Image (cartoon, rainbow, N blue to C red):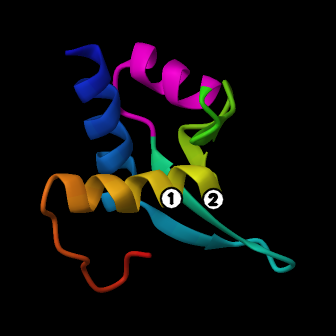
């Protein structure tokens, strides 16, 4: 069950993410209002990068790729503004 919670947390992070422009680069971020255990696991697997001081997380390329795999697994269609 824990694996499914982590998968769905990553999927929700991706689906609710937004792009933030830093001038020199762009980052895909999401608010981290999810269970800390799942966020810690996703961070350990390098799907997200987390800052204890920030209210949002940064989705890594690996995390975005995994979220796209999970979208297919859970039969979720790509939406405008996400990817």
Q: Badge 1, how many Cα within 10 Å: few under 14, some, many 20+?
A: some
Residue at the spot of label 2: 61
Q: Position of residue 19 (x, y in %)?
A: 55, 71
Is 7 in the magenta? no
Quarter that holds the C terminus:
bottom left
Q: Residue 45 lies in what quarter of the image?
A: top right
Label drawn at residue 73: none
Horizontally, residue 50 falls left or right of residue 64, namely: right
Q: Which residues are magenta?
A: 32-44
Q: Nearer the viewer, residue 55 or 81?
A: 81
Q: Identify the residue shown where x is 38% and y is 42%.
A: 10
Q: Badge 2, how many Cα within 10 Å: few under 14, some, many 20+?
A: some
Q: Residue 36, relative to residue 79: is it above or below? A: above
Residue at the spot of label 1: 64
Q: Position of residue 5 (x, y in %)?
A: 25, 26
Q: Residue 37 lies in what quarter of the image?
A: top left
Q: Position of residue 7 (x, y in %)?
A: 32, 36
Report helix, strand or loop for mark 1: helix
Q: CA distance from mark 2 to mark 1?
A: 5 Å
Q: Identify the residue shown where x is 30% and y is 52%.
A: 70
Q: Is the Cβ of the residue at disc 2 closer than 8 Å to that at disc 1? A: yes
Q: Nearer the viewer, residue 19 or 65?
A: 65
Report helix, strand or loop for mark 2: helix
């Amino acid at each position: 069950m824990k694996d499914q919670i982590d998968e769905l947390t990553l999927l929700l992070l991706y689906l609710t993410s937004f792009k933030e422009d830093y001038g020199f680069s762009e980052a895909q971020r999401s608010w981290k209002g999810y269970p800390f255990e799942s966020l810690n696991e996703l961070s350990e697997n390098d799907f997200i990068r987390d800052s204890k001081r920030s209210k949002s997380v940064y989705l890594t390329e690996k995390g975005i790729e995994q979220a796209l795999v999970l979208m297919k697994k859970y039969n979720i269609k790509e939406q405008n503004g996400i990817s």
